Amino acid sequence: MKQITLQFVTVDSAIDATIRWYTDSPISHVDTITPGGKLLGSQLHKPCGDGVLVRAPNYAKFSCVKTLTFDVTDEQFGLYWVFLVKQLGKPYDSGAVIGLFLHRDWRSDKKWFCSELIAAALEYAGILQIDTKVNWVSPQMLYLLVSTKFGA
């Protein structure tokens, strides 16, 4: 067995404030913690670069940090990281918030919003099945899905 850790946070930015307001949640962003302790995710963060990147654990000032760690099989762990590595360098999906109203496909792998990237990786690895008709997977929605499934 292996473990995956997700870090759900609040970041102080206009986009994050919009996400918190729309989802009525203190959570506005999610990264996954790499085995080496860095953060992998999709973020609109100019000083550290936009899009899907591996960043230092302190790349932004986070508040309301919540981590969820859960066990997965070795195969699921491998598939999860294979998927994420293939997404490195892809752009941040800055239109994701608007996309909720435009019926966009959140499973498109051309660009990523943070929680959609992690949700897609969890689905790809067979860890989590997301049966939702919404066109956007918010950080709060992902937090609730993962914490409910794994009792975290």
Image (spheres, rainbow, N blue to C red):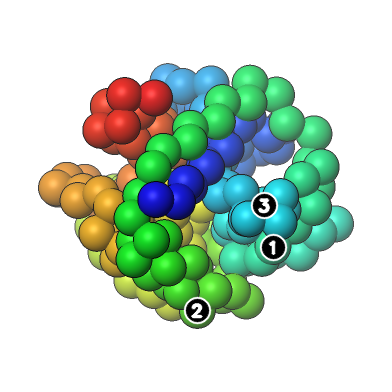
Q: Distance between the Cα atoms at labels 1 and 3?
A: 6 Å
Front-most of residues 124 and 10: 124
Mark 2 belongs to which amino acid? Lys
The part of the image, by quadrant, that contains residue 11 is top right
Q: Under tag 3, what secondary structure?
A: strand
How far apart in space, not on screen, are marks 1 and 2 (Cα)?
Answer: 12 Å
Given contact means CB atoms under 8 Å apart, are the residues at marks 1 and 3 in contact? yes
- Label 1 Cα neighbours within 10 Å, binned few <14 / some 14-19 / many ≥20: many
Q: Considering only order in the chain, which callout, 3 or 1, is on the residue closer to the N terminus?
A: 3
Q: Position of residue 117 (x, y in %)?
A: 44, 59
Q: Position of residue 120 (x, y in %)?
A: 34, 60
Q: Amino acid at mark 3?
A: Leu
Q: Is residue 17 visible?
A: no
Q: Label 3 belongs to which residue?
A: 39
- Horizontal side, residue 60 vs residue 148: left or right: right
Q: Is residue 72 visible?
A: yes
Q: Which residue is mark 2?
A: 86
Is 99 above or below relative to 8?
A: below
Whole-percent x and y of residue 73? 33, 55
